[in-house]
Amino acid sequence: MAEFNPIIIAFVCNWCTYTAADLAGTSRIGYPENVRLIRVMCTGMVDPQYIIKAFLEGADMVLVSGCHPGDCHYINGNYKARRRIKLLHAILPTIGIERDRLKLTWIGASDGIQFARTMQELVVQAKGMGPGSGRPEIMT
Amino acid sequence: MGIQRSLNIENEDILTGIQGFLTAILASQDIDAMLVPKRTSAGHSIMPVLISHPRELNGVDPISPQFPLNAARQVSKLTKKPSGKKIAVLLRPCEIRALIELVKLKQGDLSSLLLISIDCPGAYSNKEWASQCATQDMPDAAEFIEHRLSGRDLPIAKACDACEWPVAALADIQIGFFGMDYRKQLLVLFQTAKGEMLADEMALESVQVPEHRSRQLNEYISNRRSAKAQMFENVRKKTNSLTNLEVYFEACVNCYNCRVACPVCYCRECVFNTDVFDHDSYQYLVWARRNGSIKLPCDTLFFHLTRLVHMSLSCVGCGQCTNACPNDIPVSDLFRMVGEDTQAAFDYEAGFDPDQALPLSEFKENEFLDVAGV
Ligand code: SF4
Ligand code: SF4
Ligand code: FES
């Protein structure tokens, strides 16, 4: 059987985590291709619907990552994101999507190395958990 | 702590007694109109009716075990803009709780309202009610109350069987039969300043709340809690994976009646009615090719999960989503259960404290620190 290759959908803030990913790239620090970045202007614009859709479409893990508390360019977008993730953490496990499949991290613009490390760590975790339940059979 | 009075019932005719009381309220200088459940002219249904002339109070029936819709949304229509008029509204406890949520969402206002409520022993679903009416005369309300209080098994709506709030917390005037010899006498509690102002006009006798009231209430509530625990246990097993959830909603035809019936589904325009879900024809073929097939209409689970995210924090467990479903899907069993989880996550209780902010309407720097991290 082929090795399980998880798909991780990552909604990343333009000002921090996306910039960190860029920095990792320009510094030639690789990160696993399991992670599919979706650039957003702020974590505060990540509608919980995007996250649900990602899971229903087969994501094995979803990450929302933005600026550290106090650093959001729109003042409190990351606090809104935190409450929304908290809400989803209260719903998803009931329908069989484990809490650990939805992550929230703060990765600042200069944290290229941390970005790459975090992505590696997430892939290890996602592999450990196995395929998410929303994965269409034909895709797996 | 409020003013306690008794409403004497003649000839065991509870309904006429309550109608008399409502007539006195409507006659008050302070009240311009009244929204009350009233029997339709054909007689088989009960609908909220806005009444300004006392003549129209004939046929008002707030104790019939029928609950065709949650009237909070109707009260929202009457109060979202100031009318300058004072309106008395007679609501079930779950309707008041839904109204409180709408007020927090700025879709309603309490200041022009006098809230009246009656102890609620639950109600039948629309379907069950229709079938009862088809086989017998209208079910007798007093008998219904008696059976409910004695714990007899009646095929009432599951949401009502699992409802642990038979008494409205926030009513200005509460009419009670728990703990009373209610075929002879009802309790009337004027429990707020607004309520108290009307107490003297009502010419009722003072009374002590019988001790038996809280005993009977507690027993009733603990039965409801066991029913709720049982309901949650069943629904948990049936919805614990996406595959099971698909089975749970397999009869769903995306009619969105559950959303229309829900008093706290608050969006002016539901995203599922917008262009976002008006997919390109080609898109369906892409999905079908990727997955091998695609069920149409699609987005069924997406719809229900979105609704859970949007309104479970405000779900009051009224059961109207289930009541409205043409395909008998127990929607409210799931929504009530998830609602309890999401509300607990934010230490929030829908429909109780008008001053407690909606969980997604405020955000702080130092909170829920354990949510972030790998
Ligand atoms: S989701 Fe169902 S039970 Fe909850 S408030 Fe809406 S209609 Fe009532
Ligand atoms: S009312 Fe029933 S069939 Fe209609 S959308 Fe809701 S669950 Fe589906
Ligand atoms: S701008 Fe980065 S999280 Fe708001």
Image: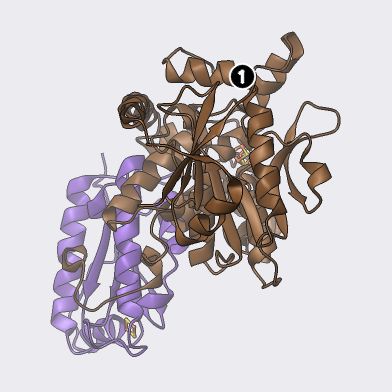
Chain colours: A purple, B brown
The residue where tag 1 is placed is B12
**Chain assignment, label 1:** B
Q: Nearer the viewer, residue B206 or B212?
A: B206
| Left or right of residue B104, residue B325 in this image | right
**In the image, residue B97 above or below residue B245:** below
- The quadrant of the rendering that contains the C terminus of chain A is top left
Q: Pinpoint residue A51: horizontal percent, then vertical percent.
A: 40, 60
* Residue B340, image quadrant: top left
Q: Amino acid at mark 1?
A: Glu
**In the image, residue B43 above or below residue B55:** above
Q: Pinpoint residue A92: horizontal percent, then vertical percent.
A: 34, 48
Query: Looking at the image, can residue A7 be seen?
Result: no
| Left or right of residue B132, residue B293 in this image | left
Count of numbered marks = 1
**In the image, residue B5 above or below residue A55:** above
User: Residue pushed farthest right?
Assistant: B42
Q: Is mark 1 within 8 Å of ligand 1?
A: no
Q: Nearer the viewer, residue B43 or B200?
A: B200
Q: Nearer the viewer, residue A126 or B54?
A: B54
Q: Pinpoint residue B27: horizontal percent, then vertical percent.
A: 72, 52
**In the image, residue A10 above or below residue B61:** below
* Residue A72, image quadrant: bottom left
Q: Residue at x 48, y 41 (%)?
A: B5
Label 1 element class:
loop
Q: Residue at x 63, y 23 (%)?
A: B10
Q: Nearer the viewer, residue B115 or B250?
A: B115
- The quadrant of the rendering that contains the N terminus of chain A is top left
Q: Residues within 10 Å of mark 1 (few under 14, many from 20)?
A: some
Query: Looking at the image, can residue B133 be seen?
Result: yes
Q: Pinpoint residue B306: horizontal percent, then vertical percent.
A: 49, 54
* Residue A70, image quadrant: bottom left
